[in-house]
Image (tube, rainbow, N blue to C red):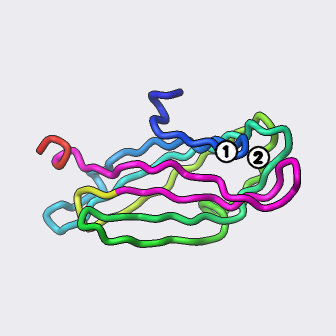
Amino acid sequence: MKALFPHAETTRGVTVRVSVSYLPEQSEPARGKWFWAYHIRIENGATEPVQLISRHWRITDGRGGRHDVRGAGVVGEQPVIGPGESYDYVSGCPLNTPTGAMEGSYHMIGGEDGMGFEVAIPPFALVSPARAAG
């Protein structure tokens, strides 16, 4: 699983794993547009169900510009993840630079106390192949 999801972080028994792919077919470097897809797997290693309520992403472009994205759920859902279960989704990130980075958190409810808590999304780099080779 490590190779599939090279970035991982665990908070209160909930592990967030991330893999990222550059999408050349959706990118137009000559027009200053680069696009990545990221695959997230959220694993509930706790003994109680948790529900993902909202997300907060911090996206930094290659020039250091930062953009915060907040919203309800992920890909239109607010999944409940039972003990020992996982939830996967894929989304994307466009940038106007060939490099960047993302990190953030999910607001969850549930767990042993039924209260809300933040689950860290591990930081990961967005690097186009041309940039990586150069």
Residue 36 in the image: state x and y as whole percent. 36, 53
The quarter of the image holding the C terminus is top left
Q: Quadrant of residue 45?
A: top right
Image position of 12 with respect to 74: above or below: above
Badge 2 crowding class, 10 Å Cα cut-off, few under 14, some 14 to 19, many 20 or more, is: many
Q: Residue at x 21, y 61 (%)?
A: 28
**With respect to residue 111, does 28 lie above or below?**
below
What amino acid does circle 1 point to? Answer: Tyr
Residue 7 percent coordinates (x, y): 47, 40
As measured in the structure, the alpha-carbon distance from the residue carrying label 2 to the one carrying label 1 is 7 Å
Is residue 121 found left or right of 26 in the rendered image? Answer: right
Residue drawn where x is 28% and y is 49% of the image = 127
Q: Is residue 45 above or below residue 102?
A: above
Q: Which amino acid type corresponds to the residue marked 2 in the rendered image?
A: Ile
In the foreground, 20 or 117: 117
Mark 1 = which residue?
A: 87
Q: Which residue is mark 2?
A: 81
